[in-house]
Amino acid sequence: MNTISENIKRLQMELEKGNGRGEKVSIIAATKMQPPEAINEAILAGVDGIAENKPQEFRDKNDLLLPCPRHFIGHLQTNKIKYLIGKIQLYHSCDRMELIEMLAKQSLAKGVVSDILLQINIGEEASKGGFSYEEAKVVFAEVEKMEGLRVRGFMAMLPNVEEESYLRSLAQKMRQLFDWAKGERENIDYLSMGMSGDYALCLEEGSNMIRVGSTIFGRRNYDQ
């Protein structure tokens, strides 16, 4: 079995030439249920960021971890923002206006500017949050004006289906949205799309940030 460091080295070599457009790819380690020792090994191996799914887990582990950009990638309840504000470098899962408005309010109160990604429900799945593709541009324009926040791009999760042509069409739509936003504003840098099971396809279609857990840490043991 490969070590965490070996897995990251292999992934870095795989991504050495960038995505399908030759752009640098950021590797974000999804650290759900991982102990601090494993996360610190990933940090030392050179991941670009570490990402938690649950605010309480972030709170409990944060002080035990080495310096590294902290990301948040899970569904976020407004009453849990207090655990994260001023400590997270990038919020991926800004999926509704209520959350975004509260994040802006608490960022202003704390005297910080929070970098965010707008989550797009590109597959129109009832089980997932996020704004629709059709409303994305309007939401982007509205949120971009809010004090306390800085929109840095978009996040999406592709559906768990087998039809590759369909998945590619969705990934291409996300890249088109990202390119539009880059033409509208500065600081639009990230298209966070691709997890351990589908990152190769997403990178081919222009994602420049992937969120990978099992590729780095191995399969999770949910019995622990």
Image (spheres, rainbow, N blue to C red):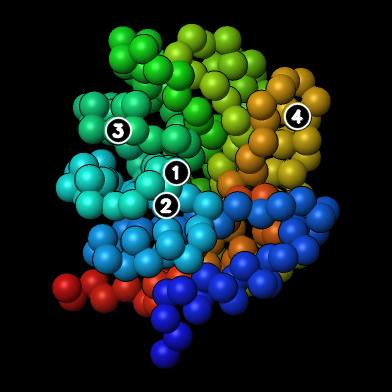
Q: CA distance from mark 3 to mark 2?
A: 14 Å
- Residue 169 higher or lower than 180, as above or below: below
- The residue at which mark 1 appears reads as 69
- The residue at which mark 2 appears reads as 50
Mark 2 or 4: the one toward you: 2
Q: What count of labels does the image hold?
A: 4
Q: CA distance from mark 2 to mark 4?
A: 25 Å
Q: Secondary structure at mark 3?
A: loop
Q: Amino acid at mark 1?
A: Pro
* Residue 143 picture quarter: top right
* Residue 16 picture quarter: bottom right
Judge from the rendering whether residue 181 lies leftward or rightward of residue 34; answer left or right.
Answer: right
- The residue at which mark 4 appears reads as 182
- Where is residue 128 shown, x and y percent of the image? 44, 46
- Where is residue 155 shown, x and y percent of the image? 56, 42
- Where is residue 54 shown, x and y percent of the image? 27, 46
C-beta proximity under 8 Å, tags 1 and 3: no
Badge 2 or badge 4: first in the primary sequence:
2
- The residue at which mark 3 appears reads as 84
Quick one: label 3, few (<14), some, or many (20+) residues within 10 Å? some
Q: Secondary structure at mark 4?
A: helix
Residue at position x 80%, y 25% from top? 183
Residue at position x 54%, y 32% from top? 118
Badge 1 or badge 3: first in the primary sequence:
1
- Residue 152 higher or lower than 103, as above or below: below
Residue at position x 75%, y 58% from top? 19
Badge 3 or badge 2: first in the primary sequence:
2
